[in-house]
């Protein structure tokens, strides 16, 4: 019971409340999905340090093996660099830029929808306030009386839709800002990591990279002939 009315009756009598309910389901779904994605693809400083250590020690084979087990953008960037050792530092830097932009798109997926829900829920709450007041004044016009029994239904709808809209909009806006800031921070981390990877690889003697590339070619040929 809310303001003397059953919850089911409130939703039954108000289209705005039904729309707000759908908004709340959509917002909760996006928040849970985004939290899980960020959790799975979080940047681990220990992994970052280990990968750079392998590269600085010219241990490309171990770096590749380690990167294959790292299920986040760090591992994917290392594999991208090791697969393109024949390219110049500038070319690898361009590849990193494209990769980071792709990762950013993945991190920001559905966030625009969450921001829309945050704004839309608040406006729907305001719309419910207006329709509730219209209903209250309509009842007054019909009965010719302004007693509590006449206006209570309209006023209740106005107050409930406003509260429900704010209850959805405020947390949605909070999570939208949080995930957006998180995506920006991760993008900056990846850009910094990419620059250090290039320095770690191309500041070392060329011979080490050539040996690794030849070993990779031999390994691919052996794998091919196994079939």
Image (cartoon, rainbow, N blue to C red):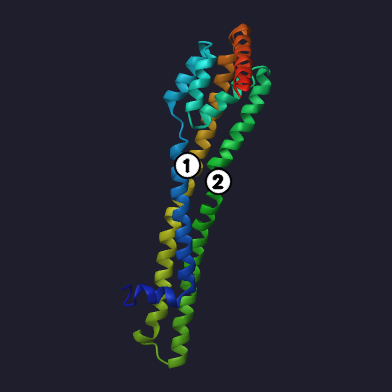
Q: Position of residue 43 (x, y in %)?
A: 46, 31
Name the residue beneath numbered marker 2: 109
Q: Which residue is mark 1?
A: 37
Question: Vertically, is 181 above or below 207?
Answer: below
Q: Nearer the viewer, residue 136 or 23?
A: 23
Give the Cα distance between marks 2 and 1.
Answer: 10 Å
The C terminus: image quadrant = top right
Q: Is residue 219 above or below residue 208?
A: below
The reply to whether callout 2 and callout 1 are in contact (CB within 8 Å) is yes
Question: In the displayed image of the protein, which residue is found farthest to the front?
Answer: 227
- Seen in the picture, residue 111 relative to 158 is either above or below; the reply is above
- Binning the other alpha carbons within 10 Å of mark 1 as few (below 14), some (14 to 19) or many (20 upward) gives some
Q: Where's residue 224, x and y in %?
A: 63, 22
Q: Decide: is 92 above or below 38.
A: above
Secondary structure beneath label 1: helix
How crowded pointer 2 is (Cα within 10 Å; few <14, some 14-19, many 20+) is rated as some
Residue drawn at the location 49% of the way across and 20% of the way down: 51
Of mark 2 and mark 1, the one earlier in the sequence is 1
Q: Quadrant of residue 94?
A: top right
Tell me the quadrant of the picture where the N terminus can be found.
bottom left
Please state the horizontal and vertical placement of residue 208, each as a whole percent of the image: 59, 8
């Amino acid at each position: 019971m809310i303001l003397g009315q059953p919850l089911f009756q409130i939703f039954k009598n108000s289209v705005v409340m039904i729309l707000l309910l759908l908004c709340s389901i959509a917002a909760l779904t996006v928040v849970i999905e985004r939290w899980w994605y960020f959790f799975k693809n979080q940047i681990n400083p220990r992994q970052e340090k280990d990968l750079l250590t392998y590269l600085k020690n010219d241990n490309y084979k171990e770096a590749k093996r380690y990167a294959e087990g790292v299920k986040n953008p760090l591992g994917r960037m290392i594999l991208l660099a090791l697969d393109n050792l024949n390219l110049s530092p500038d070319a690898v830097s361009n590849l990193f830029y494209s990769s980071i932009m792709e990762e950013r798109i993945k991190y920001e997926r559905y966030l625009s929808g969450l921001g829309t829900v945050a704004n839309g829920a608040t406006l729907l709450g305001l719309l419910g306030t207006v329709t509730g007041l219209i209903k209250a004044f309509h009842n007054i016009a019909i009965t010719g009386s302004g007693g509590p029994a006449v206006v209570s239904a309209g006023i209740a709808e106005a107050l409930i839709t406003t509260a429900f809209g704010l209850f959805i909009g405020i947390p949605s806006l909070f999570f939208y800002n949080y995930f957006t800031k998180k995506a920006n921070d991760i993008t900056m981390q990846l850009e910094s990591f990419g620059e250090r990877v290039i320095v770690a690889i191309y500041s070392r003697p060329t011979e080490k990279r050539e040996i690794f590339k030849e070993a990779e070619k031999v390994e691919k040929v052996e794998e091919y002939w196994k079939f």
